[in-house]
Image (cartoon, rainbow, N blue to C red):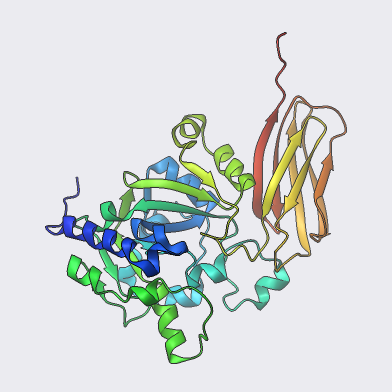
Amino acid sequence: MVGRKPDADRIARVLRDLGEQDWVKRTERRWWPYCVFHYTDIRNAVQILSDGYIYSRERAEQNGKLRISSGSTSVLSGTRADVKKYVRLYFRPKTPTQYYAEGIYSRDALSQSRFSDAHCPVPVFFLFDSASILGREDCRFSDGNLGSPSARKLSTAVELEQLPWGRIYHTGSFHPSTPEGRDIVFRRNAEVIVPDRLGLEGLRRVYCRSNAERETLLSLLPPELQCQYQSMIMSTTRSILYYRRQTFIEEARLSSDGAVFSFSPETQSPGPFHLKVDLVTERGSQSRELESFSLTDDFRLRLAFRASFYSISVSLDGNLAYSNSYEEFEIPF
């Protein structure tokens, strides 16, 4: 059992006071002080919920638990080895790091991205109670991106109160090439870290980017975990956690004679994609592929026969975009 810091109660007060400040309270940031945030690809999220822990990058790689790595190789190569021994969370959503990684990029769009190997196709957010995590005896936090040598590891309530919150919580546009802009990027990536692994006791919500992605996450969990986490796993169509700049499936409508998939209309990378649909019915399994699929409208799949049950998954350029099952129930009267 991890102990509490001597000033854990004061840390909680600092967070409450931050949430009561007008510049926070009267904006979209009003709930940020009460959470710390961790996002990862949906396949990693399944692993986390199955294990009951978020592991540090070092331990996850050693134990084969990092299904998808969304970090840029160039950034990770410059990150100190000791930082990789920590579970890394953020003080806020929509960090600069997330900006480049979030969503399914087409091959063309990914090749033009500043960090072309930073790719988190279907991000899932884990929201933890901030006072619970920051009050842990082993928890530290930084005043900026720990990938930078200038970031400081801090611990106390006084240091928490003195963080440059105006820049950590900065919203809106800025010029990243200016000294002020570079500092904003650095501060927006300020982190909360716990060594080795973090249990899910302080977990408050799991947020998906759309209802279709919530269905996918639940479908990938074993039945007992579906029951355990169903009420905690939510979806949001608002841009409070996600940039929503790249491609994802917003809605899936499954029926006995087929499926219809609606994609994000605001995507900046509409394709072309290699689309693959894997289908398993009572008559066996089959795959359907389109080599050059662009998001001009909904994608409709019609079954050759009426099916009372089937499972279906959709991938774009090899990235899982949707997974679920359909079952038709007969009403006994």
Whole-percent x, y for residue 78 in the image: 41, 79
Q: Residue at x 49, y 77 (%)?
A: 74
From the viewer's side, name the closer residue of 108 and 33. Answer: 33
| 290 displayed left or right of 74 | right
x%, y% of residue 213? Answer: 61, 47
- Indicate the quadrant where residue 218 lies: top right
Residue projecting furthest to the left: 6
- The number of callouts visible is 0
Left or right of residue 252: residue 167: left
At horizontal 51% and vertical 67% (from top left) the residue drawn is: 98
| Image x and y of residue 115, in percent | 57, 75
- Decide which of 301, 37 is in the foreground and name it: 37
Closer to us: 112 or 17: 17
Q: Quadrant of the N terminus?
A: top left
Residue at left 31%, top 43%?
Answer: 201
Residue most toward the top? 333
Q: Quadrant of residue 11?
A: bottom left
Please indicate whether residue 224 sits to the left or right of residue 144 in the image.
Answer: right
Taking the view exactly as shown, the residue that stands out farthest to the right is 304
Q: Residue furthest bottom?
A: 178
Question: In this view of the protein, can residue 145 be seen by the observer?
Answer: no
Q: Nearer the viewer, residue 328 or 48?
A: 328
Residue visible at 31% across and 56% down in the picture: 130
Q: Is residue 248 left or right of residue 10?
A: right
Picture quadrant of residue 147: bottom left
Q: Position of residue 266 (x, y in %)?
A: 70, 63
The C terminus sits in image quarter: top right
Q: Is residue 225 visible?
A: yes
In this rendering, is residue 14 above or below 251?
Answer: below
Q: Is residue 257 above or below residue 166?
A: above
